[in-house]
């Protein structure tokens, strides 16, 4: 095989090695789809294995692929397809003997060979027949095949890789053969138990224990009971001495439990207990027919008949004494710290109990129920739930036990135990849902009828209000199973439609939307409200407490009397309690309930005091006083309680409680003022600070609007004077009249980007929102004073501040935080423009309108979907606003043709496929060309595949329309060069610009200029690219520039010489990755453009580029580069030396 063929072979196999796993992983969820293709894949791979001339690397690769298939489909199914004829045994055994157990790279080969051997050893005749003449030519005896296989199995039971699992499978199939069992079983078990007893506590010892336990578990699983019963006591004794349950290794404890249950099944006779519960008919269609009472009665008769001989029980026999030990260990396994051990123990409980007499089985159920105590840990609750589910679905949990079982399962559905800053219990709730799912399949509807309402309500509560998405989905699945199997859950179909598996994935939607629908059914109204009041309002998670309060607000209209007379009096004392979570949640809940009651009163034309009596009102007023007197606004709790009480103040104010001139108003005002002053003491992150500010400002707004106004709707003069004195700087009427000027000036200063506040984008965003609100509040008058209203003298200043913020592209660890500022600036520009159009349209100058529309067009062409969509919607809103029309919009007629009014609502700006085609057409409008091309540059040179694809395609489609128009192409190129100049060394634009130029050159967008050697475009572009990468250490930028240089090679004359010089210069760049990239792309460029250098030296140049190692030290690379310069006729770059000048 030639060197070139070997290279191709290696590349091909490496590609396969990475490609096949990717393909196979797609079948993980539905592996049965592989079944029609397994046989031909297996045959192809085994053909490679059987071929004596196949390289060892190819054989190992085939085994890797066989392992991948077995991993996805499962070895038990895949193993059936392996050939298992007589002729296969010796080759497989010989191939396995040749393997090195310590080779870490070929473990898949050994794993598959062991599995294959486990199939070939099932030949239906004595192994001795395969030995023939058992002596060699030298007269020495040959090892029998039986012993060879056993030796291989023993050796691989102690290795540390996956082959150990396959060796256990081989042992279970080979040792249980009649001939092997008769001759080798006692010795093999003795070897296993000896190895198990002598294994040390080191890592090597743990591997040995793992292999021995797997072998024993597989043997007792697949072997006949009569063959292994004599050895069971010895194995159990050895296992007890080894004390596996106290081991720190999870897998060993799981294997120990697995072996224990297999020993239990060996001690007990394999028969089905006649006393077990049998449901009878399980037809879904029958359950869903309410008229199927006859069927239910038939089912009941069948069950009664099956129970008539319960007293006879099936030939009672003596239970071995070891069973007590085994059941005890299985019950202990239910409390293990790892889920896989508990799950194995639960299955063991179910299997062993199915072979016990009725009385002993009931004792086991009683022992499991003892785990549902609040003195037990969450692991015991979880294991108990798994065990009950196994017992129920096997019919071993008799209906007489349901009154004891159902209450503990209902408790498990809401189990949540706080541990430090979080909680445990989600696994318990998930397992409780599994119990409900299993019961739905196991019991007749008549048996479950007494518990239907309790189980239905609890499952709905978990499906809607659980914090964990897995628990919500598990509860929804269990509810669905009960609706289908039982057919007795009230309003089951309607609830399932609203709270299906996918709908409950969103927690906020569950709390605020789905719960409102479900609470409309009377059977679920009070249980849902009670759960929120008892369990959720004081949840350890602050987000859950806030959602609970909002949910109580939404549920109040369905039970206003219950909320006012029972829920609210229950929550009020807790609002001033000791526990922080309870106190915080109760304050929020009381606020939301009161506000909801006020809305009810307004709808019914009744005063709010009809729902809130004097005692309740007094208790509401005293919440702040008690918290203040107990100093609960200080320290860590203050960070939670201050925003909560501010929310409470807001809701009380919005509820218009009769508190006018009440002293509590001043006390609430003190809290607001003090919180504003000390906000930095209670917040550590920007998010916390913003949330805190919003709560305080909302409270102040609502308080002022309700309690600081006169009957005529004007501000109370007394309060107003107090507030101005508090503000400090405004000492007289003249200064007060200057407030608008100072407010606008202060807000504009906040929008400036300074070195200190670069990353404080939230302040700039909020300042922009405030500017718009101030403008709407003070109003507009063209000739009015600038210190009181928006007028001709200050409107341009406001526009300039908003327009400047559209250039905010600041970034930090959170990403493009300037996008928040740009979004707020766009919204404020739209609100200000619409305000001016509806009041004084003459204040909108042509220049302001032009800048605004151009900036919006640019942002409508940028890469972030969300902000592009916002910019596009604002752009179209201003364009199509007709009440009245916005004046001075450039190219209005052309814009309306590109964006018809009919597409105003339907155009999806978030989808790149819809957004870029129309916005790119604005390149044909001179006013918009610069800004739109700037926005497109960032998108075409971006990272998101869909954005790059559609934006580039739209740009190329536009360029095709002007491809032969020299004047239009010259204008376009001038704009492109100007954008590059304006953003030189601005990586946000320059790197995407280089990527876009690479695509444009590759697509032949500038072919019209290729013949003109003196054209300005190529010269200026080369100059700008060289300036952009000068002294650059940005690998991404350098790679993009290399691609541009290679694209510029199509321009002939002096440009081509300069480009080649630049590329050869980059061949000696300090970064090895840049040197390799340059060599690779230069090679591809010479393949594409065969007229760049003389044909006589082309082969030598390309050989030098491909064969030389460009990772070596720079002197060597420089020599290689200089040789290329000589071949290509390019001047050799000269190393620049620093010149020292001075005065002697």
Image (tube, rainbow, N blue to C red):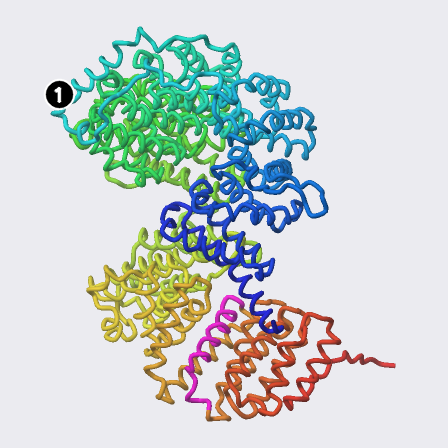
Q: In which quarter of the view is residue 795 placed?
A: bottom left
Q: Position of residue 977 (x, y in %)?
A: 48, 80
Q: In percent of the image, x 36 and y 80: which residue is there?
A: 959
Range of residues picked out in magenta = 987-1010
Q: Position of residue 267 (x, y in %)?
A: 49, 16
Q: Residue furthest right?
A: 1144
Q: Position of residue 393 (x, y in %)?
A: 34, 24
Q: Is residue 699 visible?
A: yes
Within the magenta stretch, is there residue 1005? yes
858 above or below 117? below
Q: Is residue 601 left or right of residue 1096?
A: left
Q: Nearer the viewer, residue 697 or 272?
A: 272
Tally the numbered discs.
1
Q: Nearer the viewer, residue 518 or 869?
A: 518
Residue annotated with mark 1: 294
Within the magenta stretch, is there residue 651? no
Within 10 Å of disc 1 (Cα), the crowding (few <14, some 14-19, many 20+) is few
Q: In which quarter of the view is residue 387 placed?
A: top left
Q: In percent of the image, x 67 and y 86: which residue is there?
A: 1125
Element class at badge 1: helix
Quarter of the rendering occupied by the N terminus: bottom right
């Amino acid at each position: 095989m030639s060197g070139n063929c070997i290279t191709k072979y290696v590349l091909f196999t490496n590609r396969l090695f990475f490609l096949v796993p990717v393909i196979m992983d797609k079948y993980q969820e539905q592996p049965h789809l592989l079944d029609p293709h397994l046989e031909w894949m297996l045959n192809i791979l085994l053909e490679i294995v059987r071929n004596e001339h196949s390289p060892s690397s190819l054989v190992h690769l085939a085994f890797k692929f066989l392992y991948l298939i077995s991993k996805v489909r499962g070895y038990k199914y895949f193993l059936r397809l392996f050939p298992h004829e007589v002729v296969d045994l010796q080759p497989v055994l010989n191939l396995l003997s040749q393997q090195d157990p310590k080779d870490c790279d070929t473990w898949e080969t050994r794993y598959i060979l062991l599995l294959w051997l486990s199939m070939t050893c099932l030949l239906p005749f004595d192994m001795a027949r395969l030995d023939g003449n058992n002596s060699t030519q030298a007269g020495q005896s040959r090892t029998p095949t039986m012993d060879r296989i056993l030796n291989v199995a023993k050796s691989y039971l102690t290795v540390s890789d996956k082959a150990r699992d396959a060796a256990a499978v081989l042992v279970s199939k080979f040792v249980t053969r009649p001939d092997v069992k008769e001759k080798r079983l006692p010795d093999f078990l003795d070897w296993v138990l000896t190895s198990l007893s002598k294994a040390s506590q080191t890592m090597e010892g743990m591997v040995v224990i793992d292999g021995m336990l797997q072998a024993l578990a597989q043997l007792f699983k697949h072997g006949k009971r009569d063959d292994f019963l004599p050895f069971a006591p010895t194995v159990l004794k050895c296992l007890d001495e080894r004390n596996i349950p106290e081991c720190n290794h999870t897998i060993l404890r799981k294997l120990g439990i697995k072996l224990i249950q297999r020993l239990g099944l060996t001690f007990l006779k394999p028969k089905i207990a006649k006393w077990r519960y049998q449901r009878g008919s399980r037809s879904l269609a029958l359950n869903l027919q309410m008229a199927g009472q006859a069927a239910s009665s038939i089912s009941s008769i069948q069950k009664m008949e099956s129970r008539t001989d319960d007293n006879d029980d099936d030939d009672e026999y003596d239970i071995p004494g070891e069973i007590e030990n085994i059941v005890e260990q299985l019950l202990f396994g239910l409390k293990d710290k790892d889920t896989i051990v508990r799950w194995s123990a639960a299955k063991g409980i179910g299997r062993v109990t199915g072979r016990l007499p009725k009385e002993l089985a009931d004792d086991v159920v009683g022992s499991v129920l003892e785990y549902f105590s609040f003195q037990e840990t969450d692991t015991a609750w979880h294991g108990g739930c798994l065990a009950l589910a196994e017992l129920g679905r096997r019919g071993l949990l008799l209906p007489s036990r349901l009154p004891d079982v159902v209450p503990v399962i209902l408790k498990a559905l809401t189990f949540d135990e706080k541990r430090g800053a979080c909680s445990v219990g989600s696994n318990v709730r998930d397992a409780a849902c599994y119990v409900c799912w299993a019961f739905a399949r196991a019991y007749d509807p008549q048996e479950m009828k007494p518990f239907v309402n309790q189980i239905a309500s609890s499952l709905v509560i978990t499906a809607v209000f659980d914090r964990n998405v897995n628990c919500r989905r598990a509860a929804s699945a269990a509810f669905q199973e009960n609706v289908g199997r039982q057919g007795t859950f009230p309003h089951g179909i309607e609830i399932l439609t609203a709270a299906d598996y996918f709908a409950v994935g969103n927690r906020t939607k569950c709390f605020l939307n789905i719960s409102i629908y479900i609470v409309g059914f009377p059977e679920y109204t009070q249980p849902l409200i009670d759960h929120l009041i008892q369990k959720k309002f004081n949840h350890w998670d602050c987000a859950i407490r806030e959602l609970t309060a909002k949910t109580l607000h939404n549920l109040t209209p369905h039970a206003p009397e219950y909320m006012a007379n029972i829920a609210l009096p229950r929550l009020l004392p807790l609002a001033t309690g000791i526990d922080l979570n309870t106190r915080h949640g109760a304050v929020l809940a009381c606020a939301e309930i009161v506000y909801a009651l006020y809305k009810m009163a307004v709808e019914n034309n009744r005063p709010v005091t009809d729902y809130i009596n004097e005692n309740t009102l007094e208790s509401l007023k005293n919440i702040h006083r008690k918290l203040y007197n107990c100093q609960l606004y200080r320290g860590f709790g203050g960070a939670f309680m201050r925003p909560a009480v501010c929310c409470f103040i807001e809701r009380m104010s919005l509820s218009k409680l009769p508190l006018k001139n009440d002293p509590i108003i001043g006390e609430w005002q003190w809290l607001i003022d003090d919180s504003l002053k000390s906000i930095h003491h209670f917040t550590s992150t920007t998010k916390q600070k913003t949330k805190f500010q919003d709560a305080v400002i909302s409270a102040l707004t609502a308080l002022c609007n309700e309690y600081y106004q006169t009957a005529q709707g004007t501000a109370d003069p007394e309060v107003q004077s107090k507030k101005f004195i508090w503000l400090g700087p405004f000492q007289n009427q003249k200064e007060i009249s200057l407030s608008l000027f100072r407010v606008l000036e202060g807000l504009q200063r906040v929008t400036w980007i300074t070195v200190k506040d670069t990353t404080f984008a939230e302040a700039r965003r909020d300042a922009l929102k405030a500017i718009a609100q101030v403008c709407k509040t003070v109003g507009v008058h063209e000739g009015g004073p600038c210190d009181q209203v928006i007028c001709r003298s200050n409107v341009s200043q406001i526009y300039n501040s908003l327009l400047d913020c559209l250039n905010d592209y600041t970034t930090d660890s959170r990403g493009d935080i300037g996008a928040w500022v740009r979004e707020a600036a766009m919204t404020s520009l739209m609100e200000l423009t619409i305000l001016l159009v509806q009041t004084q349209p003459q204040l909108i100058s042509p220049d302001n309108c032009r800048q605004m529309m151009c900036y919006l067009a640019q942002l409508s062409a940028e890469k972030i979907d969300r902000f592009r969509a916002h910019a596009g919607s604002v752009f179209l809103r201003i364009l199509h606003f007709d009440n009245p029309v916005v004046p001075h919009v450039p190219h209005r007629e052309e814009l309306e043709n590109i964006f018809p009014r009919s597409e105003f609502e339907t155009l999806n700006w978030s989808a790149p496929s819809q957004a870029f085609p129309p916005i790119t057409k604005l390149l044909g409008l001179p006013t918009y060309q610069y800004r739109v091309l700037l926005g497109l540059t960032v998108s075409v040179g971006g990272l998101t595949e869909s954005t790059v694809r559609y934006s580039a395609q739209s740009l190329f489609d536009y360029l095709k329309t002007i491809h032969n128009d020299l004047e239009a192409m010259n204008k376009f190129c001038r704009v492109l060069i100007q954008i590059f100049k304006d953003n030189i060394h601005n990586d946000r634009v320059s790197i995407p610009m280089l990527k876009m130029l690479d695509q444009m050159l590759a697509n032949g967008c500038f072919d019209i200029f290729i013949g003109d050697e003196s054209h300005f475009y190529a010269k200026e572009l080369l100059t700008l690219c060289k300036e952009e990468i000068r002294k650059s250490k940005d690998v991404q930028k350098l790679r993009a520039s290399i691609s541009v240089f290679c694209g510029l090679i199509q321009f002939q004359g002096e440009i081509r010489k300069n480009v080649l010089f630049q590329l050869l210069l980059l061949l000696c760049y300090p970064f090895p990755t840049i040197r390799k990239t340059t060599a690779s792309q230069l090679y591809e460029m010479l393949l594409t453009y065969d007229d760049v250098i003389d044909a006589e030296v082309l082969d030598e140049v390309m050989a030098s580029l491909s064969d030389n190692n460009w990772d070596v030290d720079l002197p060597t690379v420089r020599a290689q580069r200089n040789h290329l310069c000589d071949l290509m006729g390019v001047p050799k770059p000269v190393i620049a030396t620093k010149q020292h000048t001075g005065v002697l």
